[in-house]
Image: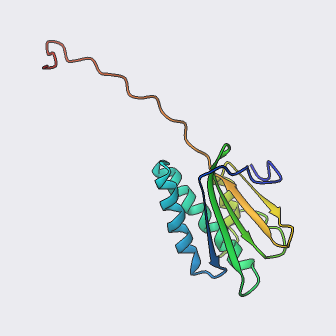
Amino acid sequence: MIHSSPTPPAWPEPMAMMVVPAEPEAVKRVRDWAGAWFSGQGHTPDVVDTARLLVSELVTNACRHAPPDTNVLVRIYNSTAGPTLEVWDRGDGRPTAKPLDETSQSGRGLAMVELIAETWGVTPLAGGGKATYAVLATPSVPAPPAVRPSVTGHKPRR
């Protein structure tokens, strides 16, 4: 699951981008924006909810570890690998998922990302900082329901 590729998938159009201050108050704005975008792209409610959850975790992590008075850049798009979220920040260090612990007050975000995302990873940025990305799993499209035969003795009216 984690780090299956050293870089995020290539991003085709359409792609959306948002820049927010690296502050906790920005998380809700990004979550709502990402949910609306993925919904507008025709994704199922489950995919939209997953996108909202994962972008919340990634942005929260970026805001917590970014230097003061900096911004966080969020890019969302539909790649060939699946719906993709990227969060760029200027923080040093490489995020890693910690083991889940029921008693921890924090530090579970990336463990959740690892459990829920199809894949995720971190790419260092040339000018410093990093881009953390997650690719969402998408459910297979179910076959359309079979046409039900009419009840014996009843024919549809024309």
What is the basis of the colouring in this image? rainbow
Name the one closer to the observer, 108 or 18.
18
Residue displayed at 68% across by 74% down: 72
Name the one closer to the observer, 16 or 115.
16
Q: Is residue 98 above or below residue 155?
A: below
Image quadrant in which you'd find residue 99: bottom right
Instruction: Give x and y (percent) for residue 88.
Output: 73, 68
Residue displayed at 65% across by 67% down: 74
Image quadrant in which you'd find residue 124: bottom right
Camera sees residue 76: yes
Extreme-front residue of the structure: 13
Residue displayed at 55% across by 36% down: 140
Residue displayed at 58% across by 44% down: 138
Camera sees residue 104: no
Instruction: Give x and y (percent) for residue 19.
Output: 63, 73
Instruction: Give x and y (percent) for residue 133.
Output: 71, 59
Image quadrant containing the C terminus = top left
Instruction: Give x and y (percent) for residue 112.
Output: 65, 60
Extreme-bottom residue of the structure: 69
